[in-house]
Structure formats: structure tokens, C-alpha cells
Image (cartoon, rainbow, N blue to C red):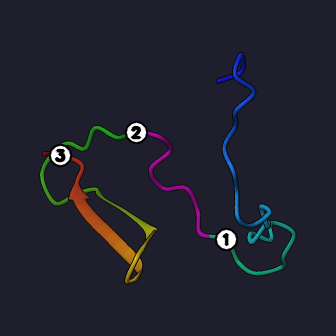
Amino acid sequence: MREMGTRAKTKHKFRVTTDSNHKLPVSPNVINRDFKPSGPDRLWLSDITYTATDEGWLYLATVMDAYS
């Protein structure tokens, strides 16, 4: 792509939406990057993402047991 002078075209400029400088309470880090629970139903992980489609935004949410 570099040799041909092509690059990705973005419609909108990147906008920061996270404000890390706030005075709101922050939950403690109880996992401490230990992703190997001792048994099932001890540690659950989740995430959400979204993508644009012709019909609008499509949201995908997942929840997983870290033991499995």
C-alpha cells in the first residue's frame, strides 16, 4: 500500500471520549491480572463492541466464565 500511495480513509476524526481526570470513585482491582480462577463461577469476564452496518449500529455483548 505504501508503494502505491494508498491509505485508509476515515470519515470522522478520532475523538477522545474517556475522561481519566475525574473525582468519581474507582472500583478496586480485585483480579490483579490473575485470570486462572480455582473453580467455575468465580471469575466472569465481559466485553461490548459495536460496528456500523447498513441498517445502523450493531452491538455485540459477551459474558464468559474465565474457568472454562
Q: Position of residue 64 (x, y in %)?
A: 22, 58
Which numbered disc, 1 or 3, marks the residue that appears first in the sequence? 1
Q: Nearer the viewer, residue 12 or 20?
A: 12
Residue occupying the far front of the picture: 4
| Residue on which disc 3 sits | 67
Q: Report the Cα–Cα distance between label 1 and label 3.
A: 26 Å
Q: Residue at x 40, y 39 (%)?
A: 34
- Which stretch appears magenta? 27-34
Q: The disc labelled 2 sits on which kind of residue?
A: Asp
Q: Are marks 1 and 2 in contact (CB under 8 Å)?
A: no
Q: Is 22 or 15 nearer to us in this picture?
A: 15
Label 1 sits on residue = 26
What residue does disc 2 label?
Answer: 34
Is tag 3's residue or tag 2's residue first in the polypeptide sequence? 2
Give the mark, 1 or 2, whose residue is nearer the N terminus.
1
Q: Quadrant of the N terminus?
A: top right
Examine the rendered structure and indicate whether residue 38 appears above or below residue 53: above
Give the secondary structure at mark 3.
loop
The tally of labels here is: 3
